[in-house]
Amino acid sequence: MAGSKLVLEGRVSIKAFLLGLSVLVIPLIRTCYGHVDWVFDYLTETPGKIVICIHIAVINGLLLITYRGPLYKVAVRACFLGVIFGCGLIISFSETTWTHFGWYLCSLSFFHYSEYLVTAIINPRSLSLDSFLLNHSVEYTLAAVSSWVEFTVEKLTFPELKQLNWLSVVGLLLVLCGEALRKAAMLTAGSNFNHIVQNEKAQSHVLVTSGVYAYFRHPSYVGWFYWSAGTQVMLCNPVCILGYTIASWRFFRERIEEEELSLIHFFTEDYVEYKKRVPTGLPFISGIRAN
């Protein structure tokens, strides 16, 4: 019963994400019926903003009618991420100087939604609203807001800085590679993966050393590290590139040491030997010292 309920939550999230993605209908209407003035400049002028607000309100009404309780909470979050992804696509394919911010919106929304969906697939028992990682931490939220503020301020004061297309492409590649590595790690680990460091070994918990784990001891952290830094390279945010890199490095250094204490306790010599063969994958982070 629990398993089917969690699988249902995953299916609901897919439907809600796609429903949110229907915000893409707005520019299609504009393209087909350009003479209707209430859909022009849909992301910048008042008429367009009103249309998007009405569209979102209608979608939320559908979700309220369709789902109740926990399922509505899942649906509304997935739908919100779908709307952000859709808006990111609209910006990305529009004739605007905000193109790279559109890439960023797509990257951010896809990361958070895919965290939930992949968890629903590989480890439904651990699935919860926290699996979206939207409320990861206060520090994470402040970092995100800081990047938005820096991008906006620098775009207004040094617009040429935000038009370094080659640098944004490098950032996009970092984001794509980091995202792919993290999801590959989650899928490879399967039910062994958990967003929360486990202090007690479950019966099904095994040491995973194949796939991407044959190259990095902590591929999910490596992926997240480069994804995080890549988002700021994509935005050409010099201050946040430095800040994100330092903050992420410190966070993962502490997280890896904490996790490896548990892994050594769980798997003893097997993990110690694995640790000797395979690096963490993160620069200047060797993990906990094992005698």
Image: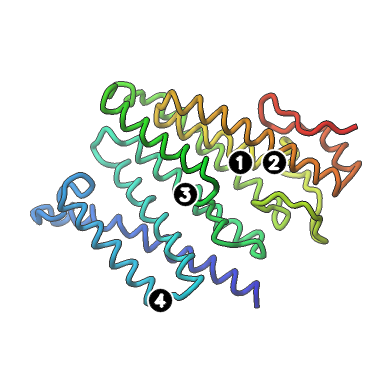
Q: Position of residue 213 (x, y in %)?
A: 73, 41
Which of discs 4 and 3 lies nearer the camera? The answer is 4
Most extreme residue toward the front is 138
**What amino acid does circle 1 point to?**
Leu
Give the spatial CA distance, label 1 vs label 3.
14 Å
Which of discs 4 and 2 lies nearer the camera? The answer is 4
The local crowd at label 3, few if under 14, some if 14 to 19, many if 20 or more residues have their Cα within 10 Å, is: some
**What amino acid does circle 3 point to?**
Phe
**Cβ atoms under marks 1 and 3 closer than 8 Å:** no
* Callout 3 secondary element: helix
Give the spatial CA distance, label 4 vs label 3.
24 Å
Give the spatial CA distance, label 4 vs label 2.
40 Å
Residue highlighted by disc 2 = 212
**Cβ atoms under marks 4 and 2 closer than 8 Å:** no
**What amino acid does circle 4 point to?**
Thr
Q: What number is the disc on residue 66? A: 4
The local crowd at label 2, few if under 14, some if 14 to 19, many if 20 or more residues have their Cα within 10 Å, is: some
Residue highlighted by disc 1 = 181
**Cβ atoms under marks 2 and 1 closer than 8 Å:** yes
Residue highlighted by disc 3 = 110
Relative to 181, 208 lies left or right: right
Q: Which mark is first along the chain, 3 or 2?
A: 3
